[in-house]
Image: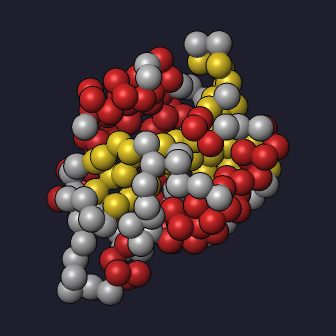
Amino acid sequence: MKLIVGLGNPGIEYENTRHNIGFMCINKLAQHFKVNLDLNKFDGKYTIFNYNDEKIILLEPLKYMNLSGEVIKKFVSFYKIDIKDVLVICDDLDTNIGTYRLRYKGSSGGHNGLKNIELNLGSNEYKRIKIGISNNKNIDTKDYVLGKFKKEELELINPIIDKIPNIIEDYLKLPFDNVMNKYN
């Protein structure tokens, strides 16, 4: 069983904000796999489906970003998911907009959602797709990540969101080394 989590903040006021790129990717995956995020449990909106004879969970934690790890921990514990089978999709201030990075593990890089996941899982050895949102040093970081994407930013972000289903399909079929080599 694999758990694919998109990080974001719940609520209409956070839609299309930089911090919600993980939710945007999960919604794209749900469309791609023709499933609906119509289940609610453990403060998460999710779905479970089979792909290549394996159960896949797509999850949007419904607690705020800084508490995402609490939701993920409940899913990992309940479904007995190995941490190596957890993949988190999130924004990354330290990566240029229009680019992304796949990682096996690593530090939170100051990302509060990732810090909370590491705290709750007791490990930083979960996979991740970090999508660049750049960093505007002229705006307070909190205001920047909670700010809406500008049209020209979406023109750079949308091709990455469109590519996420291909990356995930490869992740579900291939060793992660191969996926990283193909997409990094």
What residue sits 42% from the left and 29% below the top? 176
Q: Position of residue 28 (x, y in %)?
A: 45, 38
Residue drawn at x 62%, y 42% is 83
Tell me: residue 160, above or below residue 16: above
Res. 120 image quadrant: bottom right
Q: Please, is residue 23 above or below residue 4 in the view?
A: below
Res 123 visible = yes
- Left or right: 171, with 84 as reference point: left
Colour style of the rendered protein structure? secondary structure
- Quarter of the image where the N terminus is located: top right
Of residues 72 and 35, the one drawn nearer to the viewer in this rendering: 72
Name the residue at the top extreme: 53
**Whether residue 33 is situated above or below residue 162 in the rendered picture:** above
Q: Looking at the picture, how far across and down is residue 70, in whole percent?
A: 70, 62
Q: Quadrant of residue 119?
A: bottom right
Q: Is residue 184 left or right of residue 1?
A: left
| Res. 21 in view | no
Instruction: Pinpoint residue 13: horizontal percent, then vertical percent.
Output: 51, 71
Q: Nearer the viewer, residue 166 or 106?
A: 106
In this image, 71 relative to 12: left or right?
right
Residue at position x 65%, y 58% from top?
122
